[in-house]
Amino acid sequence: MNNETIFHSFLKDSLQGFVDEKKAIGYSFAKGESLLKQFDKVVTSLPQDIDMLTKDLVMKWTERRPEEATSTQLGRISLMRGLAEYMNRMGNTAYVYPKAMVTVERYSYTPYIFTEKEIASIFTVCDDFAISYQSPNRHLVLSLIFRILYGCGLRISEAVNLTIADVNLKEGIIFIKNTKFNKERTIPIADTLRNRCIEYNRLVNTGKPETSYFFPSPLGGHYKSNTIYILFRQILWAANISHTGKGLRLHDLRHTFAVHCLKKWVLGNRDITNCIPYLSAYLGHEDLRGSQHYLRLTADLYPDIIDKVEKNCSWLIPEVNWDESY
């Protein structure tokens, strides 16, 4: 347990106990602890007669802020739910934000699903990307990282944080750690992608220690997610793929991977009931809901297979739209 006092409000013991519990069961919880410090400062400024985690306090702290993404607000809601549940287990009185109040507004983002032709165009542009003297391996990084994002459905943060040791070229598997839901996972990769990884590793990482980043930045460390996004926009422009509206996201490659998998399984008459848990585990979802929403999206995008989807697995399809955080 950390003996350093980092909380000062009347909730300090509960806040510290909640943090200690999370860390004790294996969560890094750095972001959660940082948010709780902010919450503690707010609570410290409250009138002295408030001595419990009330509904008004929870609702005020979790309300949507100007220009804030839904996922950011949901992070605070999830944190407050966890804190309140912990406090109630410890015999205190705390208001738990109702889960039902979250689900109605949560699914507000419709991802862009690339066509197979668009994916091929993206890969072609990456393969032909100009060599940079300031960043001599950039064209090699781009050629592979976008194939991994699409071919494995990785989050960009997961891809850029891979080390050489995380990519097992002999077995053809990738080990992913420090993930969004703190769920480590090992995923197999296709032989064609494995062969590309082998060649890339030979050209870029020969002689480097296993702890080095698989996608090293010329500035040291690993490529930043924002840098890859800026290059992604250039690639989309060169591939004649419109970047209109709110703009396409790197995360849309992950969404595309999932939808293309489901489309292939449905057309191949696979038992989707059995396939959904595999997809959920492969993507590192917290539960099955994320993969079920991909099924809804697959049915909406491909009218030619909607009859099969509705006939074989309509009960799996949720009624709400989308959650930008999957």
Image (cartoon, rainbow, N blue to C red):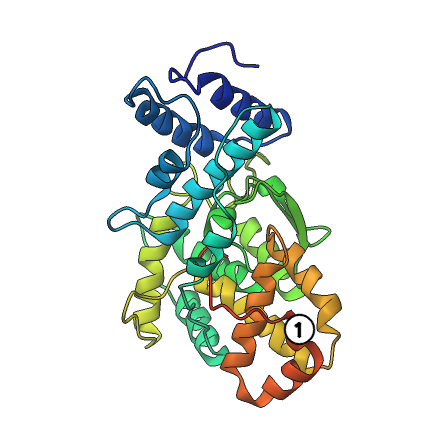
Give the residue furthest to the front. 49
Nearest the eye: 315 or 190: 315
Q: Residue at x 31, y 66 (%)?
A: 247
Furthest-left residue in this view:
66
Q: Is residue 66 left or right of residue 215?
A: left
Could you say where residue 212 lies in the image, as x and y percent from the top left?
Answer: 52, 36
The image shows residue 110 at horizontal and vertical percentages of 42, 68
Q: Amino acid at mark 1?
A: Trp
Q: Residue 189: name its quadrant.
A: bottom right
Q: Nearer the viewer, residue 130 or 181?
A: 181
Residue 166 drawn above or below residue 156: above
Q: How many marks?
A: 1
Position of residue 78 measured from the top left corner of the image (x, y, whole percent): 48, 42
| Residue indicated by mark 1 | 315
Specify few, some or many for label 1: CA neighbours under 10 Å numbering under 14, 14-19, or 20 or more: few
Q: Indicate the secondary structure of the residue bearing disc 1.
A: helix
Name the one closer to the observer, 99 or 214.
99
Q: Residue at x 30, y 70 (%)?
A: 243
- Quadrant containing the N terminus is top right
Answer left or right for 66 relative to 136: left
Q: Is residue 109 above or below residue 154?
A: below
Residue 118, by quadrant, is: bottom left
